Image (tube, helix red, strand yellow):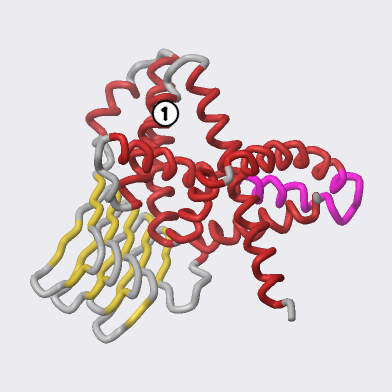
Amino acid sequence: MMAKTLVGITLVLSLVLLLAGGAIANDRVRIGGDVLVEKGMTVKDAVAVGGHVTVNGVVKKSAVAVGGSVILGPDAVVRKDVVCIGGVIEKQEGARIGGDTVELSIPGLKAILPYLYDKTPVGWLVVFEIVTFAGLLALALLVVALIPGPVGLISENVRHSLLKVTLCGILGVLVMVPLAIFLMITVIGIPLVALEVLLVGGAMLVGYIAMAQFVGNRLAAAIKRPGLNILWVTVLGLILLWAIGWVPFLGPAVKSTAILLGFGAVLVTVFSSISHRREARAP
């Protein structure tokens, strides 16, 4: 069971590492710089973290800029969504977008600076919470924009298999410590302890984002907006979980439950996928 858990989490984290490394062929993914899709060029995704995305060609899926702007030239074609966090979307005449446009401005420094001069623990706590939430929001939108299918499937598993998700989450958490101890007592396994931490952290992050999408879907249905785009649904869920997190006692309990269920949903999704592939290969 421990080996299966490690393999499952590895598959999930590979999706997160994919965002940082741009491992998919024909993608344009850059951290700390600009991305340019020239005229006549066709790419799968165009993603810039800490830079601008300029499109003069064709983007088969999404164009995403975190901490920069998205600039669409007159010949630009983006077949799915255009997402801009912390910048603006500039669309010239003739540019075409097949999906939705999401432009999210990060609160300006004027809203945060007063707290920077407040030396009390409460002031620094507010600054830390705002910066942390802004980072989580940006990362969540990036993940959902690039891999909407897996995140949506994890969210659906929470709705359809809540008991199984809960049990897998609890079992996964219980397995983590014995697995780490087992790796530490073997010479070759010592470096894998750090890898285990990264894998589990990545799985919990993806699971939490999926849980936010699940909560956002419920909230959208409650306010009679069931057709909201998955990006906005995810934003709604994250904001609601963040707001609840400020409530003493209840907030930490709700967030911990969301992380546990999300982790369990990731494991269920990975194991189900492996099982389906084995069945498909069986004669």
Amino acid under label 1?
Glu
Eyeballing the image, is 262 above or below 253? below
Q: Is residue 58 magenta?
A: no
Eyeballing the image, is 36 above or below 177? below
Q: Determine the main secondary structure of the stretch shown in magenta.
A: helix
* Residue lying at the far bottom of the rendered structure: 40
Name which residue lies at 59% across and 47% down: 265
Q: Position of residue 76 (x, y in %)?
A: 21, 75
In the image, taking residue 103 as reference, residue 257 lies left or right, namely right
Range of magenta residues:
182-202
Q: Is residue 201 magenta?
A: yes
Who is closer to the viewer here, 53 or 178? Answer: 178
Q: Position of residue 138 (x, y in %)?
A: 38, 47
Q: Position of residue 95 (x, y in %)?
A: 15, 72
Which image quarter: residue 92? bottom left
Eyeballing the image, is 231 above or below 208? below
Q: Which residue is mark 1?
A: 129
Which image quarter: residue 148? bottom left
Who is closer to the viewer here, 97 or 269? Answer: 269
